[in-house]
Image: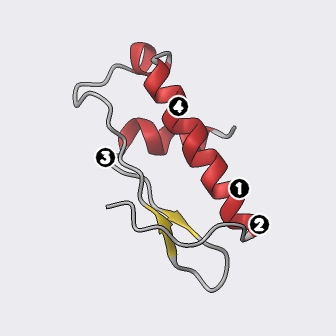
């Protein structure tokens, strides 16, 4: 997985997953990690790994066009 997925989950409150063209919001998973984040401890936390994997899988699915849009709010 690329560093961009890591940064989006680490820094954000939510990650917006977009579809391929025509672009629509497919999902907006919340990055429900502690507000106070430390690079080392956060990135080894099981929840961080779950979120990163979820975002990666949703983006790959969106690229293939295999899932319907989801609100996620």
Q: Secondary structure at mark 4?
A: helix
Q: Which mark is residue 64?
A: 2
Q: Which residue is mark 1?
A: 60
Which residue: 56% across, 47% down? 55
Q: Do the CB atoms of the residues marked 2 and 1 lie less than 8 Å apart?
A: yes
Measure the alpha-carbon separation of dots 3 and 4: 15 Å
Q: Residues within 10 Å of mark 3 (few under 14, many from 20)?
A: some
Q: Residue furthest left?
A: 35
Label 3: element kind: loop
Classify 42 as above or below 63.
above
Alpha carbon separation for disc pair 2 and 3: 26 Å
Residue 39: quadrant of the picture? top left
| Sequence-first tag of 4 and 1 | 4
Circle 2 — which element?
helix
Q: Residues within 10 Å of mark 4 (few under 14, many from 20)?
A: few
Residue that mark 3 sits on: 13
Q: Residues within 10 Å of mark 1 (few under 14, many from 20)?
A: some
CA gap, disc 4 to disc 1?
A: 15 Å
Q: Nearer the viewer, residue 72 or 63?
A: 72
- In this view of the protein, which residue sits in the foreground, 73 or 7? 73
Q: Is residue 53 left or right of residue 31?
A: right
Left or right: 49 in relation to 56:
left
């Amino acid at each position: 997985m690329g560093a961009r997925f890591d940064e989006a989950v680490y820094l954000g409150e939510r990650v917006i997953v977009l579809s391929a063209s025509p672009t629509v919001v497919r999902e907006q998973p919340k990055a429900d990690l502690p507000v106070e984040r430390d690079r080392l401890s956060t990135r080894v936390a099981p929840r961080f790994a779950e979120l990163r994997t979820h975002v990666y899988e949703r983006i790959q699915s969106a690229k293939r066009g295999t899932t319907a849009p989801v609100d996620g709010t």
